[in-house]
Amino acid sequence: MLKLDEFQKFGSEGVNVVLQQFGAVSKSVQAIASEVADYSKEAFETTAAATEKLFGAKSLEKAIEVQSDFVKTSYEGFVARSSKFGELYADLAKEAYKPLEGYFAKAGVK
């Protein structure tokens, strides 16, 4: 049977775990937001440059070449960033769970 002291200690440890978890989640969300902002800026700049080249194209063949290059570059950038986002979200999950490992071990939860 849990005594009042043990119960209070367990509760205060729970609060500490929640605060640690909040800090880890906050840090990871900031990293994700920063990556989204960088990707958005890069995508805007790439689109603006491609649009400028497209308007400057003197022939249909050149316009198709510019558009093809843009699509290829955009797709490659998207795939690379998708991989990076996947890593960031996996890190978020790991970091959010870390504080809970010790807490659950003390509580006897497997």
Image (cartoon, rainbow, N blue to C red):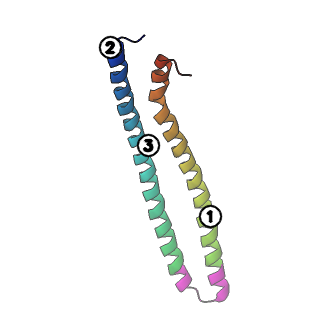
Which three-letter amino acid code belongs to the residue tagged 1? Tyr
Which three-letter amino acid code belongs to the residue tagged 3? Ser
* Image x and y of residue 16, in percent: 35, 27
Residue range highlighted in magenta: 53-64
Q: Nearer the viewer, residue 57 or 2?
A: 2
Q: What number is the disc on residue 11? A: none
Q: Residue at x 58, y 85 (%)?
A: 57
The residue wearing badge 3 is 28
Q: Reading the chain from its start, which is encountered first: label 1 or label 2?
A: 2
Let me know if residue 15 is in the magenta part: no
Label 2, residues with CA under 10 Å away: few <14, some 14-19, many ≥20 = few
From the viewer's perspective, is 91 left or right of 3? right
* Image x and y of residue 14, in percent: 38, 26
Which three-letter amino acid code belongs to the residue tagged 2? Leu
The residue wearing badge 2 is 4
Name the mark nearer the viewer: 2 or 3.
2
Q: Quadrant of the N terminus?
A: top left
Q: Quadrant of residue 82?
A: bottom right
* Alpha carbon separation for disc pair 2 and 3: 36 Å
From the viewer's perspective, is 79 left or right of 55? right
Q: Residue at x 66, y 81 (%)?
A: 64
Residue at the outermost right position: 61
* Image x and y of residue 56, in percent: 53, 85
Q: Reading the chain from its start, which is encountered first: label 1 or label 3?
A: 3
* Alpha carbon separation for disc pair 1 and 2: 60 Å
Label 1, residues with CA under 10 Å away: few <14, some 14-19, many ≥20 = few
